[in-house]
Image (tube, rainbow, N blue to C red):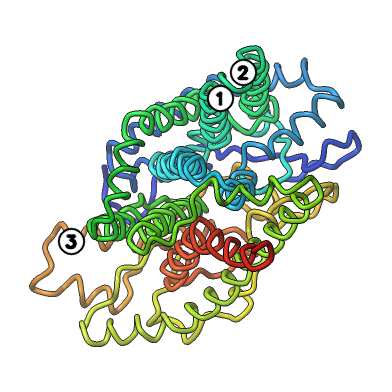
Amino acid sequence: MSSSNHLAPPARAETAVFQHSPSPDSKLKTEWEPGCQPDEIYDRYLPSWRAWLRRKLVKRLREEKDWMADWQKRVRNDGRDKFFYWTAIFGTHTFFMTFLPVLFFFGFPLKGRVLLHVVGMGIYISSFAKDLVCTPRPYSPPVIRLSMSTHHHEYGFPSSHSTNSTSIALFFGQWLYELRGHVGMPTVIVGWIFLTIYASSVIGGRLYTGMHSTADIIGGGLMGTACWLLWIFVGDQTEAWVNTGTWLVPGITVPLTLAMVHYHPQPLDDCPCFEDAIAVLSVILGSFLGHWWGVITNQAVPALLQREPFGRGFFVGIGIAIFRLILGLGLMFAWRLVVKASLLRILPPIFRVISKLSGSHLPTRRFYKAATDYQEVPTKIAFRHIPSVVDLQIGETDSSTGISPVDSPLLNGKELKSPPYAESEGLRKRMNSSTTTEKEKEKKKRDEEIRVLIRMNKRKGDRAKYDAEVLTKVGVYTGLGLIATSFIPVLFRQIESRIFG
């Protein structure tokens, strides 16, 4: 491909039209989506094998968009809009992360770890795949999106809703089967029917709402199934390994998690998939460390003892349940606020010292500012609400949007042309260094061109991101996994032992 400083004239960029409420009189909004830059940009800047995968998936999207739009027109009505609008919640990371601590709080730690590992790895793998291939969602128009959240700010393939709902349904289906001797096979079958309806409504709803293509939901479903099957084969061995109390548990899981964070694919658009991947990997790491800590200190509370207070009567059980939820969730929120604010203050100076001592810039992901380029992280970032909750746009019917079809070439179909490539002085010096190979020069030049494209196509209203946020998220969510799965249940036991004797 030509190494000219200008990109070839790009193809038309499809727009994205949204309806953020199932109300019939809700207004449509035109919004930015990742993956919708001209194909020439992805072909030029992605590694050849990633670009090839993207071309295959995009070809299928273009073949499907017209029949998807026609199908939407035939099947959409007010009742179905409301149903699929609301059931989408049950395939989100928010639903999973909110429900997960309950298993640990109420005496089912083994099942909690299984659910965390199965669904958590599905979230990680689907986030990894999204940033790997950078594919858009079904082209809109002609398809119209129906969504309450900002999941459309992520790439299309695969559908994380499909991954999550598939693995959750399989997990609970397996658990029901294990209980068949206690609940009876008819109850198990009824449960399976319910879980099938649950998964089908979430997965089918992604097509109905125009959020995903058939390839997206098939890929997501297969990934969810693969994660469940993998844990069937390695789950018991992994539990046994941690129960040995070997120091290899932290010795392997900590560097492995940091490596998976570091080598997460770099996307060409500002997609939050990386943040989802960091969060869930860190929670899994915290669970491993908490489980291991319980083994080596003999502090882990046996499941039967955790459930014992609920046998003291209905009203006592209700009181204990409310107490555990308020205290447990309260401690988790407090941890997040305090540790996030502390790490965002502590880490940037440390990064700058390391950079100065090493004489080089520390590795920084695309879309993130290096610590040497800012003085401090704004305080308001440390006290932001939980993004997955804030992103819900329940009931919004206004037509305001941060980007309009008038001012963005990504939405109005105008040609997106790159400005003449201009090297910064620092970059020119590094490229002219005698130790810089031709391959390194080409990579630095490509990175500079990508930064130009990022500045051109950044969403209006996007805040700056800072390198300290990456390790901060690792620290915060590792701690959440640790305290939610281990420390808080121990605290419950100590408090309740004092109360009941």
User: What amino acid type is highlighted by mark number 2?
Assistant: Val
Q: Name the residue under label 3.
A: 440
Q: Is residue 414 left or right of residue 267?
A: right
Dot 2 crowding, Cα within 10 Å, few <14, some 14–19, many 20+: many
Q: Which of marks 1 and 2 is nearer the N terminus?
A: 1
Assess whether mark 3 and mark 2 are in contact (beta carbons under 8 angstroms).
Answer: no
Assess whether mark 1 and mark 3 are in contact (beta carbons under 8 angstroms).
Answer: no
Assess whether mark 2 and mark 1 are in contact (beta carbons under 8 angstroms).
Answer: yes
Q: Can residue 254 be seen in this view?
A: yes
- Measuring 52% from the left and 75% from the top, which residue is drawn there? 339
Where's residue 143, x and y in %?
Answer: 68, 29
Residue 203 higher or lower than 145, as above or below: above
Residue 488 image-quadrant placement:
bottom right
User: What amino acid type is highlighted by mark number 3?
Assistant: Glu
Using the image, tell me which numbered label, if any, was put on residue 179: 1
Q: Quadrant of the N terminus?
A: top left
- Measuring 20% from the left and 74% from the top, which residue is drawn there? 430
- Measuring 53% from the left and 62% from the top, which residue is drawn there? 490
Residue 210 higher or lower than 281, as above or below: above
Mark 1–mark 2 distance (CA, rounded to whole Å): 8 Å
User: What amino acid type is highlighted by mark number 1?
Assistant: Leu
- What SS does tag 2 mark? helix
Where's residue 23, x and y in %?
Answer: 88, 37
Q: Nearer the viewer, residue 1 or 54?
A: 54
Residue 188 image-quadrant placement:
top right
Q: Name the residue under label 2.
A: 188
Where's residue 157, x and y in %?
Answer: 48, 34
